[in-house]
Amino acid sequence: MKKLLMLGGASFQVPAIKKAREMGYYVIVCDIIEESPGFEYAHEYYNVSITDKEGVLSLAKSLCIDGVVCYAAESGATTVAYVAEKLNLSSHPYKSIEILTNKDLFRKFQKENNFNVPQAEGFTSFEDTKAHFHQFKMPVMIKPVDSSGSKGVSKIASIDQLEEKVELALSFSNSKRFIIEEYIENYGPHIGGDGFSVDGKLVFRCFSNEYFSTNCINPFVPVLTTWPYSKSKHIQEKIHNEIQRVLDLLNMKTGSYNFDIRIDKNEDVYLIEITPRNGGDWNPEAIRYATDIDLMEYTIKAALGEDCSDLKMVEPTGYWATFVLNSDKSGTFMGLEIQEEFFEKNVVDYELLVKTNNKISALSGSHEKLGLMLLTFKKKQDMIKKIDNINNLIKINVNKLIISLSLPFLLLHEKMAILI
């Protein structure tokens, strides 16, 4: 039985741990958090941080593993590549993963290789930034170079907010570095989704439309994602070709990717991020429903060096969405209410990550989400109509319950799933 070392045992990684066991592998999980839910489903588990490269390498050597993977978490990507390279296991080149997981390095790589790229520069302090701030055309984005889930990301239009937003970005950066880059206006929805390469060739990708929180502290947290992607095949091919050019230049191998992309009014492609991992917030689950392709399974096979050559491009069918349950204010969580007809017809699966009377925070990053929902729709117009009205169909009660409702609602407190 092959041994697979899985970095991270968080709740969103549990499905991958279960999947690896279902596939017949011996699963070992490591995580610095002693209460990690993933430990319950592992054959063995160890309290080792997924960012501790030498610690994970020592553990991997002692266990004689056959593969290593970090599902849906960017924080462990460089550790995976480092350990795999040292032990001659299946993975991408370590230096390439360093470039893809550090925003300043990725922007430098893009500029050197003539990609469309915003004016950008990396910094380590507010004082360094002040001297160069005049070089940027407003507005600009300020981001930690090594965080994910939109944590610590801000948009500003003047120097007045610079110090405050720099401090915010630094608070979410392990390396204590941040990047400033000029803002790119979007033509159509922001582009997300996942893809997969086999021997460096992008053989599968499923782009999505991403929509952000407009009434929360951080307006750059994706809260709603829909499939299929709305733009033409012509634009999708342009995006595909730009991604492939990155994979070729970085000598990428076999594995999953999560995309963060913008198209401007001239239809120029801006690759904001290509992260070498599966997407979070149930991206792979929604893609499986839409295409019948199980990217979680292929990710596990790739980590163990198994053949993935049967994976081919499949266009999505039907209409699907994922919704991040969130609150625009902090307080005490008092329950979730879902309009009954919507629940019965459109909710495929749903999970709450908080319980009644838990303290919750207003959404400022993906780490503060309250749960997830996977939705399906029979027609495009039905999806558009209900998504536009989603805050009336799904209500998060904070501090006190809503007494009077105009529609019949279902009050839900624990996880339930309906498979349709």
Image (cartoon, rainbow, N blue to C red):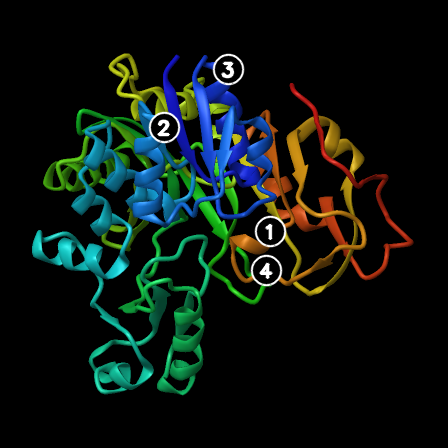
Q: Amino acid at mark 2?
A: Leu
Q: Earlier in the sequence, mark 2 or mark 3?
A: 3
Q: Amino acid at mark 1?
A: Lys
Cα separation, mark 4 vs mark 2, equals: 40 Å
* Helix, strand or loop at mark 2: helix
Residue lying at 30% horizontally and 32% vertically, measured from the top left: 61
Cα separation, mark 3 vs mark 1, equals: 28 Å
Tag of residue 363: 4
Q: Amino acid at mark 4?
A: Leu
What quarter of the picture does the C terminus occupy?
Answer: top right
Cα separation, mark 2 vs mark 3, equals: 21 Å
Label 1 neighbourhood size at 10 Å, few (<14), some (14-19), many (20+)? Answer: many
Quarter of the image for residue 28 reads top left
Name the residue beneath numbered marker 3.
22
Depth check: 143 or 378 in front? 143
Name the residue beneath numbered marker 2.
63
Cα separation, mark 1 vs mark 4, equals: 7 Å
* Helix, strand or loop at mark 1: loop
Name the residue beneath numbered marker 1.
369
User: Badges 1 and 4: C-beta atoms under 8 Å apart?
Assistant: yes
Q: Earlier in the sequence, mark 4 or mark 2?
A: 2
Whether residue 318 is visible to the viewer of this picture, yes or no, is: no
* Helix, strand or loop at mark 3: helix
Cα separation, mark 4 vs mark 3, equals: 35 Å
